[in-house]
């Protein structure tokens, strides 16, 4: 990390979790120290409804500085769908070098079936997820079934309806366990905030499935495999020159730790309420460090929002 006014940790020294967190006011402070950026989408770039203020300008400034950018998402959908969504949000593809998604990774495994776990799966798929995620079934030569008794596996892309709870799925999940149906979870996130409303994700259902005794294969952050795809896209040999930016300690920051790269936590996102921050409030570095220790993942620094200039 760059030597800013609040700097307490050398960029070559991994955070121990004992010191106050470095709080940055803008991405401009970090531009000299990194060649590549792995950016979370939901919580950093947009809220599922619109792009956050200052994001387009920040991406443009990073590109002008000749930085490489990969967007890494736990979205349970294929990369081309996310490209289209970003275009609708006003984020053109020229502002990044590639998109890697957990949904695309799961889809690629379902096509290739080149490891023992996937090779053993049948073709009868029971889909838990909304209509907007049906792109995950296209071109796979699968038979979508309506009962778990028929299913070879479950493809879990999230709840069928926004506003659902894990308890709403207890009977479905219990039935899957009873029939010993393995589950693919294409989004490990437990929850997300859409336009200010907190909702469960596929990861919450998968976690409960495991608690009930079910078998789950996860794709996406924080698993290291998906970061290898990011590294190939970035093409930067020195991984100390890559920074991961995200708003989730359990996926973005933990994933960066697993991949051995620096990380930056966006505080005006998923953990805002847990930390006790009002929207737009700068966190206290000592209090924030204490919160990170309770979760068990410690970033190299934090920033209120992904922006180039101080608002």
Image (tube, rainbow, N blue to C red):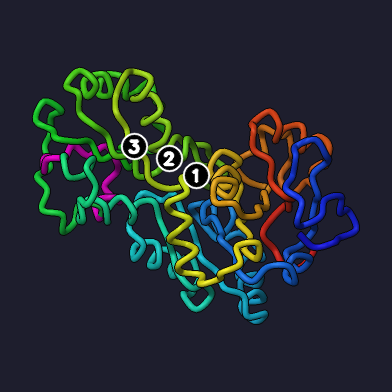
Query: Is 126 one of the magenta-colored residues?
Result: yes
Query: In the figure, residue 214 lies in which quadrant?
Result: top left
| 54 or 208: nearer the viewer | 208
Q: Which mark is residue 183?
A: none
Q: Which residue is mark 2?
A: 188
Disc with the residue nearer the chain's start (3 vs 1) = 3
Q: Residue at 56% across / 69% down in the picture?
A: 237
Query: Which residue is found at the position 65% from the left and 66% from the top?
Result: 241
Q: Of tags 3 and 1, which is closer to the observer?
A: 1
Compared across the picture, whether 210 is left or right of 190 comes to left
**Residue at 66% over, 35% down:** 273
Across and down, in percent, residue 132 comes to 30, 51
Q: Earlier in the sequence, mark 1 or mark 2?
A: 2
Mark 2 vs 3: CB contact within 8 A = no
Per the image, label 3 sits on a secondary structure element best described as loop
Reading the image, the residue beneath label 3 is: 161
Nearer the viewer's eye, disc 1 or disc 2? 1
Residue identified by numbered label 1 = 222
**For this view, does 305 lie left or right of residue 2?**
left
Q: CA distance from mark 1 to mark 2?
A: 8 Å
Q: Quadrant of the C terminus?
A: bottom right
Range of magenta residues: 121-135
């Amino acid at each position: 990390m760059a030597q800013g006014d609040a700097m307490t940790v050398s960029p070559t020294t991994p955070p121990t979790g004992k010191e106050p967190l470095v709080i940055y006011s803008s991405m401009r402070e970090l531009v000299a120290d990194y060649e590549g950026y792995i950016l979370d989408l939901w919580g950093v770039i947009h809220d599922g409804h619109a792009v956050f203020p200052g994001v387009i300008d920040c991406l443009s400034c990073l590109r002008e500085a000749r930085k490489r950018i990969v967007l890494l998402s736990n979205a349970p959908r294929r990369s081309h769908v996310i490209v289209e969504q970003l275009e609708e949000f006003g984020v053109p593809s020229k502002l990044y070098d590639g998109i890697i998604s957990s949904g695309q990774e799961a889809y690629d495994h379902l096509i290739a079936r080149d490891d023992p776990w996937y090779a053993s799966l049948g073709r009868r798929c029971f889909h838990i997820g909304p209509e907007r995620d049906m792109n995950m079934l296209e071109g796979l030569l699968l038979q979508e079934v309506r009962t778990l008794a028929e299913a070879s596996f479950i493809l879990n892309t999230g709840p069928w309806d926004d506003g659902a709870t894990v308890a709403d799925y207890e009977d479905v999940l219990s039935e899957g366990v009873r029939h010993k149906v393995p589950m693919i979870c294409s989004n490990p996130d437990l929850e997300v905030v859409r336009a200010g409303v907190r909702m469960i994700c596929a990861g919450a259902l998968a976690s409960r499935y495991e608690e009930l005794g079910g078998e789950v294969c996860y794709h996406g952050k924080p698993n290291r495999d998906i970061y290898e795809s990011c590294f190939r896209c970035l093409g930067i040999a020195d991984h100390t020159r890559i920074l991961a930016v995200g708003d989730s300690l359990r996926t973005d920051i933990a994933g960066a730790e697993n991949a051995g790269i620096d990380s930056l936590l966006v505080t005006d996102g998923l953990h805002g309420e847990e930390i006790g921050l009002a929207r737009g409030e700068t966190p206290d570095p000592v209090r924030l460090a204490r919160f990170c220790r309770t979760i068990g993942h410690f970033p190299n620094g934090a920033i209120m929002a992904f922006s180039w200039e101080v608002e």
